[in-house]
Image (cartoon, rainbow, N blue to C red):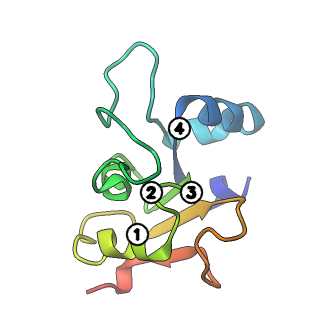
Amino acid sequence: DWLESKNASLVLRRKLLTKCLEINPFLWKNSVNLQPKWECPPIPRLKWSGEDTTDDLTLKMMKLCNTEAMATISHGNATIGYLTNHLEAKSNGYPKNLIIVHVDEHDYEFPSHLIDNSIIK
């Protein structure tokens, strides 16, 4: 319900997106399935995490959003540096808020998990 109140685009891989939509089907209108079964994937050869993560993965996901906020889960190498390196130089025309959900304590060691790129010049 909270993500719906933020009017966030939910950008996830197929299995997790399906689980989220079972809990709140109203998120469907702004959801992006990164691994559709029968269609061409919106991000070809998607590699979610690790050393060989898809280049500019966060930006590619943000391009798929149709709202001012994007919600997704931990990806890349799960650091604030990974996100800021990709977002600082290319923030124009992208959602203003990025919401990252993670469960690992060491991921995104930063007091706030909401990055507002509207202040990035």
Q: Nearer the viewer, mark 1 or mark 4?
A: 1
Quarter occupied by the C terminus: bottom left
Label number found at residue 3: none
Question: Helix, strand, or loop for circle 4?
Answer: helix
Q: Nearer the viewer, mark 4 or mark 3?
A: 3
Query: Mark 2 packing: few (<14 Cα in 10 Å), some, or many (20+)?
Result: some
Query: Mark 3 packing: few (<14 Cα in 10 Å), some, or many (20+)?
Result: some
For marks 1 and 4 on the same chain, the one whose residue lies earlier in the sequence: 4
Q: x and y percent of residue 88 in the render? A: 29, 78
Task: Look at 45% across and 45% down and name the residue there.
Answer: 48
Residue with the mark numbered 2: 76
Instruction: Report the amino acid beneath label 2.
Output: Gly
For marks 2 and 4 on the same chain, the one whose residue lies earlier in the sequence: 4
Spatial distance from mark 1 to mark 3, Cα to Cα?
A: 11 Å
Residue with the mark numbered 1: 82
Residue with the mark numbered 4: 29
Task: Look at 32% across and 58% down and name the residue there.
Answer: 59
96 is higher (above) or lower (below) than 18: below
Question: How many numbered discs, if any?
Answer: 4
Spatial distance from mark 2 to mark 1, Cα to Cα?
A: 7 Å
Q: x and y percent of residue 2 in the render? A: 71, 59
Spatial distance from mark 3 to mark 2, Cα to Cα?
A: 7 Å
Query: Mark 1 packing: few (<14 Cα in 10 Å), some, or many (20+)?
Result: some
Circles 2 and 1: CB distance less than 8 Å? Answer: yes
Label number found at residue 74: 3
